[in-house]
Image (cartoon, helix red, strand yellow):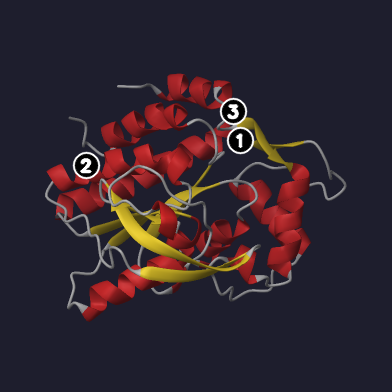
C-alpha cells in the first residue's frame, strides 16, 4: 500500500500540490468572476451566501492553502499537500461507503485528457464491487456556450466515465474528449436517467460542472478541483458538495496513478 509519506512526496514532485502550475493571476480572476456571479465560473452552483473576493480568498486559503494575502497578485499558486491528503481520505471514504451499499454511481469529467484514467479505474473497481456505473443519455447532443459561441457537443462514455466530444470527432468509446466546465452535461444525464425511470446515482464523482451541477440538484457529489475553481469549494462550504480534493487538475495523466492506488486501498477496493 502506498504510504501517506510516499504520496505526499509524489504530490510535491509531480506538482499536484505544493507549488503548482496554476498562476495566482488565474485564480484571482476566477474569484472576481465568481463574486460577480459569472455563470462561466459558477459552473452550476447557485450560491446561498454572499461571496466577495475577500471571502473567496479566505475560503481558498482554508480549503487549498493558497495565500490569504490580497496583496499577493502574481506568481504560481500553492496547494497545501496536507489538505490534499486529508481530502483524499474523505474522498476515498465516500467511495468505500457507496461500494459497501452497492449503490449506483455516475462519473463525469471535463478534463478527459488528464483525468479519464483516474475516474475509469474507480469506475472499474466500483463495478466489480457490485455498483451500477450509470451511462444515461449516451450520444445525446448538448449545446454549450463557449468563448467561441454556442457549440453542440455529444455526450459519450469511456469505461463508464462521461465526457463531451466535438461532433466531428464522435466515435463512441475512443479516449478523446473536449475540455468543459459546463453543468449542462450532468443535467442532461440526470434528466435522462429520471425520464427512463432510474436508477439515479447515489453518488456523482468528477470535476467542474459534473460536481457542481449534480450537487446543486441535491445529489451527493465529490470531486477534484484546482485553485482557480472556487465553485466546488463554495459548494462544499455551503453543503451542496460533499468532498473536494484540492490539486492541480491538468498535469500528466500518469501522475494521477498513485492517487488512484491510494484511494482504492483506503476504500478497500484494491484488486
View extreme (front): residue: 168
- Is the Cβ of the residue at disc 1 closer than 8 Å to that at disc 3? no
Query: Which quadrant of the figure has residue 108?
Result: bottom left
Q: Label 2 vs label 1: CA separation?
A: 30 Å
Per the image, label 3 sits on a secondary structure element best described as loop
Side (left or right) of 20 relative to 85: right
Per the image, label 2 sits on a secondary structure element best described as helix
Residue toward you, 260 or 116? 116
Mark with earlier residue (2, 3) = 3
Write down the residue under mark 3.
15
Residue 206 image point, x, y percent: 41, 52
CA neighbours of label 2 inside 10 A, class few (<14), some (14 to 19), many (20+): some
Residue 165 visible to the viewer: no
- Is the Cβ of the residue at disc 2 closer than 8 Å to that at disc 3? no
Write down the residue under mark 1.
80
Please tell me which residue is depicted at 37% across the width and 38% down the height of the picture. Answer: 118
Write down the residue under mark 2.
124
Mark with earlier residue (1, 3) = 3
Residue 267 image point, x, y percent: 26, 39
Query: Which quadrant of the figure has residue 250?
Result: top right
Amino acid at each position: 500500500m502506498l504510504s501517506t509519506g510516499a504520496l505526499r512526496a509524489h504530490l510535491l514532485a509531480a506538482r499536484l500540490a505544493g507549488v503548482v502550475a496554476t498562476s495566482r493571476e488565474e485564480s484571482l480572476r476566477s474569484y472576481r468572476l465568481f463574486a460577480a456571479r459569472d455563470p462561466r465560473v459558477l459552473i452550476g452552483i447557485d450560491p446561498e451566501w454572499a461571496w466577495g473576493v475577500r471571502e473567496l480568498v479566505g475560503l481558498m486559503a482554508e480549503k487549498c492553502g493558497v495565500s490569504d494575502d490580497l496583496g499577493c497578485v502574481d506568481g504560481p499558486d500553492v496547494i497545501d499537500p496536507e489538505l490534499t491528503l486529508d481530502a483524499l481520505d474523505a474522498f476515498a471514504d465516500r467511495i468505500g461507503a457507496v461500494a459497501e451499499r452497492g449503490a449506483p454511481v455516475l462519473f463525469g469529467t471535463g478534463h478527459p485528457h488528464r483525468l479519464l484514467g483516474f475516474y475509469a479505474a474507480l469506475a472499474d473497481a466500483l463495478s466489480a464491487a457490485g455498483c451500477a456505473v450509470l451511462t444515461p443519455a449516451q450520444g445525446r447532443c448538448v449545446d454549450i456556450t463557449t468563448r467561441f459561441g454556442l457549440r453542440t457537443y455529444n455526450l459519450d462514455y469511456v469505461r463508464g466515465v462521461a465526457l463531451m466530444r466535438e461532433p466531428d470527432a464522435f466515435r463512441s468509446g475512443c479516449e478523446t474528449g473536449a475540455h468543459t466546465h459546463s453543468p449542462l452535461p450532468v443535467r442532461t444525464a440526470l434528466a435522462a436517467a429520471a425520464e427512463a425511470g432510474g436508477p439515479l446515482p447515489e453518488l456523482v464523482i468528477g470535476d467542474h460542472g459534473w460536481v457542481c451541477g449534480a450537487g446543486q440538484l441535491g445529489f451527493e457529489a465529490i470531486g477534484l478541483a484546482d485553485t482557480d475553481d472556487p465553485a466546488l469549494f463554495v459548494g462544499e462550504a455551503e453543503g451542496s458538495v460533499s468532498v473536494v480534493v484540492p490539486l492541480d487538475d491538468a498535469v500528466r495523466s500518469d501522475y494521477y496513478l498513485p492517487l488512484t492506488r491510494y484511494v482504492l486501498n483506503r476504500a478497500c477496493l484494491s484488486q
